[in-house]
Amino acid sequence: MPDPKQEALEQTVRCFTLARSQDVPIHLVFLLDKCEVSRFAAPCIMIKNGHFVIRAELEQLAEHPIIWGSEVRGYFVVMDDGKRVTCHFLTKLARIYNGPLNSVYLVFPLPESLDHHQRRFSKRVNLERENAEGFGIWYGRLGGGAPEALPELAWTPLENGECELGELSASGMRLDVLASCPLSHSSLYDPLLLKGDFGKSGEPNPLFVRGVIVRSLPKPDAEGVTSFGCRFLAWRKVVSRHPNTWFRADEDGVPAIAEWLNRNFRAVAS
């Protein structure tokens, strides 16, 4: 009987070998706590001992931090017997070596298998204020109630003048905030709430999406602005017969947001 795991690994090696011979870019998305840190694309130059090696220019990495041991999502497209094959995978950054001519070698374990479906859930889309009309964002903080009562979660709306929805993906969002915004004094894992309509034309589907802050970094191209990364945890319909029932976001995020991105932003590069 053929071994399914061995067959999947052989297919993985074949696809990476095609990527190397065809000199196609390997798109890499570096994640921290499931939230995107950076992304770039570079060619695969070697496949050896269960690993593949990417060569990246130092100049290319200047604005794209990479973290040893971090989770990495990737994809590439190869031609196999005249057919276009899309390959998605999950791996980790294992080693970093200095390379020639101001470059570095990034070494990753080969994934056990590849996903060949056209996956759009991980795409991030810039949402400027004029494009984010109808979206609302709230920051949650525990507050005191009556004596001996349980603390209550108070939601503070974040205004456009102080907070901007910079990026949105199926699994999270990035918020850019000024020092005057209440969010600027938040801590990791503080709650956030997003409201948006992720339906089709003529078929509205407004959702509440609950998440937490997973990172906070100064925005390099905007003085006095801090970028907060949020990971989505759960969602529910705004109008629901069961308002207390929340659905957990799966590994790839919120399905309705993934479908909305796929419908409306097909032309945006991943």
Image (spheres, rainbow, N blue to C red):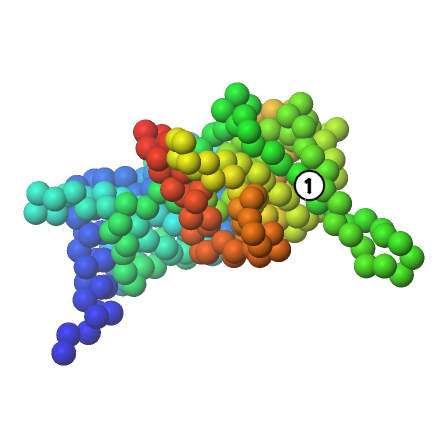
Q: Residues within 10 Å of mark 1 (few under 14, many from 20)?
A: many
Q: Which residue is mark 1?
A: 139
- Looking at this rendering, what residue extends furthest in the bottom direction? 1
Q: Estimate the x, y position of residue 5 in percent, counting from the top left.
A: 24, 69
Q: Estimate the x, y position of residue 240 in percent, counting from the top left.
A: 55, 48
Residue type for callout 1:
Tyr
Q: What residue do we see at 56% from left, 44% from top?
A: 239
Quadrant of res 47: bottom left
Q: Is residue 152 left or right of residue 75?
A: right
Q: In this rendering, does residue 243 appear at all?
A: yes
Quadrant of res 79: top left
Q: Is residue 31 left or right of residue 46?
A: right
Q: In this rendering, does residue 44 appear at all?
A: no
Q: What residue do we see at 46% from left, 36% from top?
A: 204
Q: What residue do we see at 55% from left, 29% from top?
A: 134
User: In the image shown, does 244 or 257 lie closer to the viewer?
Assistant: 244
Q: Quadrant of the N terminus?
A: bottom left
Q: What residue do we see at 50% from left, 28% from top?
A: 127
Q: Quadrant of the C terminus?
A: top left
Q: Is residue 46 left or right of residue 164?
A: left
- Looking at this rendering, what residue extends furthest in the left direction? 81
Q: Estimate the x, y position of residue 148 in percent, counting from the top left.
A: 89, 61
- Looking at this rendering, what residue extends furthest in the right direction? 147
